[in-house]
Image (spheres, coloured by chain):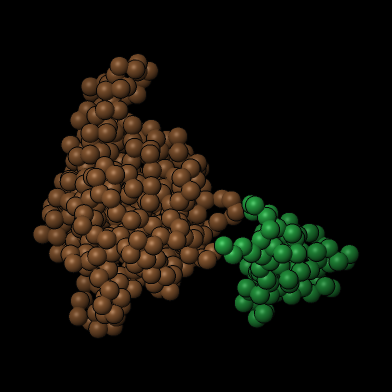
Amino acid sequence: MKFKTKYEGPWADASDMLVLPVGEWKSQKPVVKAAKCCHCGTCYLFCPTGCIEDKGRYFEANLDYCKGCGICARECPVKAISLVRA
Amino acid sequence: MDMELKSNPKLEIMEGNEAVAHGARLCRPDVVAGYPITPISSTWDHLFKFKADGLLNAETVAVEGEHSSMSVLIGAAESGARTFTCSASQGLFFMFEAYVNASTLRLPIVMALATREPNGPQGVSSSDQDAVMVKEAGWIQIFVESVQEIPDSIVMAYKLAEDPQVLLPVSVCYAGFYLSYLYAPVELPEQEKVDQFLPPLVMNPRLDPAKPMTASVFTNGNITTEYRYKHLAAMQRAKTKLDEIDSEFQRVFGRHYGGQIEEYRCQDAEIILLAMGSCTGTIKVTVDKKRKEGLKIGLIKVRMFRPFPKERLARALRGKKAVGVLDRDVDFGWNCGSLFTDLKVALFDAGINLPTVNFIDGLSGLDITEEHIERAIEIIQQAAEGKIPQEVTWLSLE
């Protein structure tokens, strides 16, 4: 028998876990115009992956986790977010 | 494939889950209720689109979970409706209480099960584990090999479920991912022929305000024992009934699948590989290859897993030199696969003493490759020569 893990069940060290580079899945990415952002946090609340980070004066997606769904751009009340080809 | 498509204008390319939805639609169900789960979710897209397009004249109920979907169907079926749902893995387990109720109430519900690995670990991928875990729940389970076989089997499943000599729910099990998302050429059964093949459901008795009856009230042991005896007897009748339905299906639609089992190049075979589901397609290719090399090997594809086709298996295996069983699941209590334990009982019952070996492969979306099947065949050959290295071989862990 050839075993690959030392564990009996579905446990893994965090470093050995299967980490999917989900940020690579996107075909388009959100770009924020920082000056236009009113810092309301709507994008932060709506993002299904929870990848929006508070940068102090504006919010911005962490592109390592953003899948490019575009919900933030759609919901932004001041249209500060646009989607561009990733 | 291009040639095939040109030579048969009736062929359409469709996804496995779409073939499920067409199969259900063609049987004109009265009530369809379900909840999406990978890998059957797109079936609901297709069914609700059929309804919106006027192709499905059914009450569609978008429920909040699988326990409710089966409960909706139980009520509907008790009142005489033809019903349909589909599910997989965690959804099936969440449905389980109602699932058992459906069979023990003897309701002819049909469901499609896209077989999937249950958690844990998080197994959003293919295997037969969910289906074999509910094997003793009183349902009839039919495993299919191809996308074409899905709608055909759904039509046959209704015919079997609604037979007055059977009256049992039927689950058509097709490999999640491998078939649910596979786009393949399909010749759909023609609607007029399905209408002819499958007359409207007549439930008797049924719940009817004009003639009030009750179902499943508290029942004592005497009567429950009688119900269980009758349930088991109906399961046994379903076996030859499926063979008859398969022959009738061939007369009407021109396609057939062997009923309870399909014997592929078994006539003069000395050794047999036994399996079920989508991997039997790859096995057929490998058997053809080995036949060219002069090896007398055949495949038995188990279509009807519950009730277990022990009589036909015994007939097919008598006189063979060895049999290997490929399982895409494990039997936690027997240290092997589920199909393997069943086969051993069937062989013992028939008084057949044959070297038997088991292979476990294809768990959680692991491909059952030609190389793995060739390795399995090599071990069956060794078994036929009286050399059994070990009873169970985990092909991917060797």
x then y, percent, for residue B339: 37, 51
Please state, as top left, top right, bottom left or bottom right, where the N terminus of chain B lies in the image: bottom left
**Palette colour of chain B:** brown
For the point 27% across and 74% down, the residue is B295
Question: In the figure, is residue A34 to the left or right of B248?
Answer: right
Residue B221 placement, left or right of A74? left
* In this rendering, position of residue B220 left or right of residue B296: right
* Towards the viewer: B63 or B372: B372
Colour chain A appears in? green
User: Can you tell which quarter of the image residue B327 is in?
Assistant: bottom left
The residue positioned 31% from the left and 59% from the top of the image is B323
Is residue A7 in view? yes
Q: Residue furthest left?
A: B251
- Report x, y in % for residue B284: 30, 70
Residue in the picture at 45% in, 61% down: B389
How many numbered markers are drawn? 0
Q: Nearer the viewer, residue B153 or B342?
A: B342
Find the residue positioned furthest to the front: B386
Q: Residue furthest right?
A: A56
- Residue B333: x, y in percent? 48, 42
Would residue B272 be visible to someone looking at this image?
Answer: no
Q: Position of residue B363 (x, y in %)?
A: 49, 59
